[in-house]
Amino acid sequence: MTKIGIIRHGSTPWNKGGRAQGNSDIQLNEEGLSGAHQLAERLRTEEWDIVYSSNLLRAQQTAEIIADKIGIQIHLDSRLREVGGGLIEGTTEEERVLKWGGKWWELDLGIESDDSVIARGLSLIEEVSNKHINQNILIVSHGSFIKQILKVLVPHFNIEESLSNTSFTSLVKYENGWDCDLYNCTKHLIES
């Protein structure tokens, strides 16, 4: 059976500031680095064969910490990047409302379409799951991207809750498709 562990990258300064990140290349903050190390320690006790990661710095840093801890190879892939935010990247909700009004999301601000996100995401999932049949694969990506892909892969699973930084979600492939057996788990995070 093929298993995919999906990880949202660690925390960044823009996460803390409520800024839309999109494809802006933001590094992890101290909390993000700590969370990635804590998740790596958790995953070290499990069997994982390979890790694929978005090539954006915040995901790449998270993946490198995990891959180093458990001794597996990392592959960077731009298909795992966050949803492109267009003109909203770097802005807060308050700034967006001031600049474009209360229904800013209805405007054409260059945000990547759902169809584009799903096409590149499903392309990667299909390729990786076919290449690594009956293996355990880690994927490190971004919150909005992950939620959109999960809604297509496991449409029967209710995905309402936002994904936490360094959260872990697990999918298992069965004959008739994918199922989610763990969603947005952060039990590895220890308050310091």
Image (spheres, grey):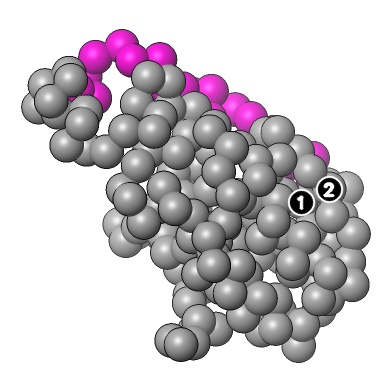
Camera-side residue of 178 and 86: 86
Q: Residue at x 59, y 37 (%)?
A: 25
The local secondary structure at tag 2 comes to: strand
Tell me the element at label 1. Answer: strand
Location of the N terminus (image quadrant): bottom right
Gap between marks 2 and 1, in whole Å?
A: 5 Å
- Which SS does the magenta portion mostly show? helix
Pinpoint residue 46: horizontal percent, then vertical percent: 76, 83
Q: Quadrant of residue 38?
A: bottom right
Query: In the rendered image, is residue 38 in sight?
Result: yes
User: Observer-nearest residue: 27 or 93?
Assistant: 27
Task: Report crowding for label 1: few under 14, some 14 to 19, many 20 or more residues within 10 A (C-alpha).
Answer: many
The residue to which callout 1 is attached is 52
Horizontally, residue 163 falls left or right of residue 40, namely left
Few, some or many C-alpha atoms within 10 Å of disc 2 (few <14, some 14-19, many ≥20)?
some
Residue 31 inside the magenta-drawn segment: no
Q: Can you give x and y, in whole percent of width and height, for residue 192 in the image?
A: 46, 87
Contact between labelled residues 1 and 2, with CB atoms less than 8 Å apart: yes
Q: Which residues are magenta?
A: 104-128
Which one is earlier in the sequence, the residue at label 2 or at label 1?
1
Residue 122 falls inside the magenta stretch: yes
Vertical relation: 187 (above or below) 110: below
User: What residue did someone put label 2 on?
Assistant: 75
Q: Is residue 133 visible?
A: no
